Amino acid sequence: MVTLEMDQMISRLQHVPGHEDQIIEMLEGFLEMFPILDVGLFRYSPIGYLTEGVMAIVPEDAGLTELSHIRDVRDDIRTVPPVKEAVRERRAVLVKGEEFIKYNFRYRFSQNTKFLLFVPICFRNTVIGVLSSTQFSAGEKEIEALLPDITRYGVEVGRIFERPYLKSGDSELLNARELEIMYLLSLGESTKSIAEKIHLSEFTVQDYIKASLKKLGVRNRTQAVAELLRKGIL
């Protein structure tokens, strides 16, 4: 049932016009899909390991919800191991016990918090954002049982937000493989290490890089990464 509901939700999201409206619909869909009462969205950059708040939906009285901006919430995930784990493993992480006591003050949106949930939003092999929830209408065990489905939601949402970045006007900017290689280059990976990671020959990786440079209209890899960062793609 969850799979069918999620497919319907993702299909609905794909047809929402406007980037901000799509983000709000994605957050509301998260609350609709799972026994969760609040959600915060953080953008994530692997350059600096930084999360930055975007917006949150929290419950109000009479069953209503309130949308608020949380741009003042920033963190280096290396100082918050549960978020680092969610990003590194690309899976939802439930924080409880001693870890909850230690880290809950950074991300909670109310006093009615007993455990925390962090969900990575994955742009292919890249994490581009994190969802954080602090209030639930179900117990710890029920939420734990839903973690695989919650993880999948982050993956499916990432695919939706991936599509616009692969296009420039009516022409293709970079295809998925080229984008993946550019991301690995941005992390300082060599051609050899990229080839090993994605199971291609070094010559094939070099061909993808050359094609990417041509599409981006730049002379070298450094300029290519800089251009993708400027466009907000990496």
Image (cartoon, rainbow, N blue to C red):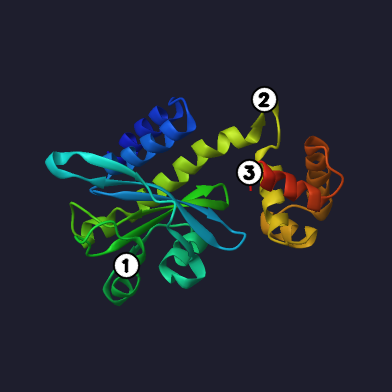
Q: Position of residue 90 (x, y in %)?
A: 48, 57
Q: Do labels 1 and 2 touch, CB within 8 Å?
A: no
**Label 1 to label 2, Cα distance in Å?**
43 Å
| Crowd tier of the residue under label 3, counting other residues whose Cα lies within 10 Å: few below 14, some 14–19, many 20 or above | some
Mark 1 or 2: the one toward you: 1
Residue at x-position 49% and y-position 58%: 51
Seen in the picture, residue 177 relative to 169 is either above or below; the reply is below
Residue located farthest toward the left when viewing the structure as drawn: 62
Residue located farthest toward the top when viewing the structure as drawn: 170
**Label 2 to label 3, Cα distance in Å?**
15 Å
Q: Position of residue 141 (x, y in %)?
A: 22, 61
Marker disc for residue 169: 2
Mark 3 or 1: the one toward you: 1
Would residue 32 be found to the left or right of residue 167 on screen?
A: left
**Label 3 to label 1, Cα distance in Å?**
31 Å
Instruction: Tell me the kind of residue under disc 3.
Output: Ile
Q: Secondary structure at mark 2?
A: loop
Marker disc for residue 105: 1
Residue at x-position 85% and y-position 49%: 220
Sequence-first tag of 2 and 3? 2
Sequence-first tag of 3 and 1? 1
| Crowd tier of the residue under label 2, counting other residues whose Cα lies within 10 Å: few below 14, some 14–19, many 20 or above | few
Q: Secondary structure at mark 3?
A: loop
Instruction: Tell me the kind of residue under disc 1.
Output: Phe
Q: Position of residue 210 (x, y in %)?
A: 84, 44
Sequence-first tag of 1 and 2? 1
| Disc 3 target residue | 233
